[in-house]
Image (tube, helix red, strand yellow):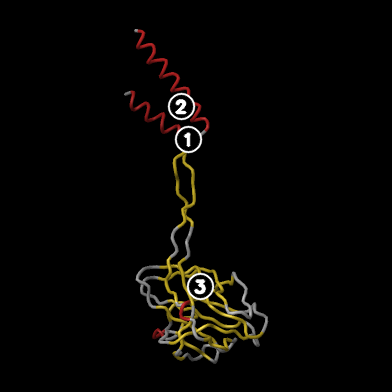
Amino acid sequence: MLIKKWRCIGALLLSSTSISVQAAPVVLHDTLASASPGWYSGITATQQTAYRIANPATNVTVNLVTLLISLQSGSGSTFGVQVCSDGPGGTIPNFADCSGFTAIDPVTSTMANVRFQGSKSFTAGNAIWVVAKSQAAGDIYRWAVGPGPTTAYITSNSGATWALDTDEYALKVEEQAISTPASIPTTTESGLLLMSALLVFTAWIVNLRKKA
């Protein structure tokens, strides 16, 4: 009976505090090291590049895309990235099922890794497409490439027709780390006071028993 009472009191002394637990990022694709020896010059509003990543084995959510790119001419703020699902035949993106990603790094005339954030979920078996283009006429960008083979497709007519390219493009696609809440037991200030009082009371009871 006494043990049960102590368990109940112990439960009252503890409260639950939420903390954030950081999940490890998952790299779904990484060819950033394939950037040597050159770049593809000519990503414009009509001349676009779409990179197809093979079917993931599980359900995934793409949160971060990194491209090794630079500005050739123009403002540098109009580079657009979409993440899309697979289109008919697996040779074109499905533009009816895309999410736009936003740049969190500047695009400059120096070739550098530029990160784009967003969210696009895929079920197992559905290929991932990363589509890059300029969102303004007259702005031209470069995308670092290396020797193929590749799963990149290019269009020169705003996506009306696509053809398999011969270069491997430098990009990384990640399921970014997401903080998830978790609860840990903590002792409240009032609980500590009550615990101290209980310890004093217990010591007093023990002392009375010894005298008896």
Q: CA distance from mark 1 to mark 2?
A: 10 Å
Query: Which residue in the protein does label 2 denote?
Result: 195
Is disc 2 placed on a helix, strand or loop? helix
Whether residue 177 sits left or right of residue 70 in the image: it is left
* Residue at point 36%, 74% (across, down): 125
Rendered position, 48 above or below 192: below
Q: CA distance from mark 3 to mark 2?
A: 52 Å
The amino acid at mark 3 is Val
* Residue 63 screen position, x and y as percent: 49, 68
The amino acid at mark 2 is Met
Q: Looking at the image, is mark 3 or mark 1 earlier in the sequence?
A: 3
* Residue at point 51%, 85% (across, down): 49
Rendered position, 25 above or below 72: above
* Residue 166 screen position, x and y as percent: 44, 90
Label drawn at residue 65: 3
Could you tell me if the residues under marks 1 and 2 are in contact, i.e. CB atoms within 8 Å? yes
The amino acid at mark 1 is Thr
Label drawn at residue 21: none
* Residue at point 65%, 85% (across, down): 73
Is disc 3 placed on a helix, strand or loop? strand
Q: Looking at the image, is mark 1 or mark 2 earlier in the sequence?
A: 1
Q: Residue 106's image quarter? A: bottom right
Instruction: State the residue lying farthest toward the right.
Output: 75
Rendered position, 26 above or below 164: above
Query: Which residue in the protein does label 1 denote?
Result: 187
Q: Residue 52's image quarter? A: bottom left
**Towards the viewer: 69 or 164:** 69
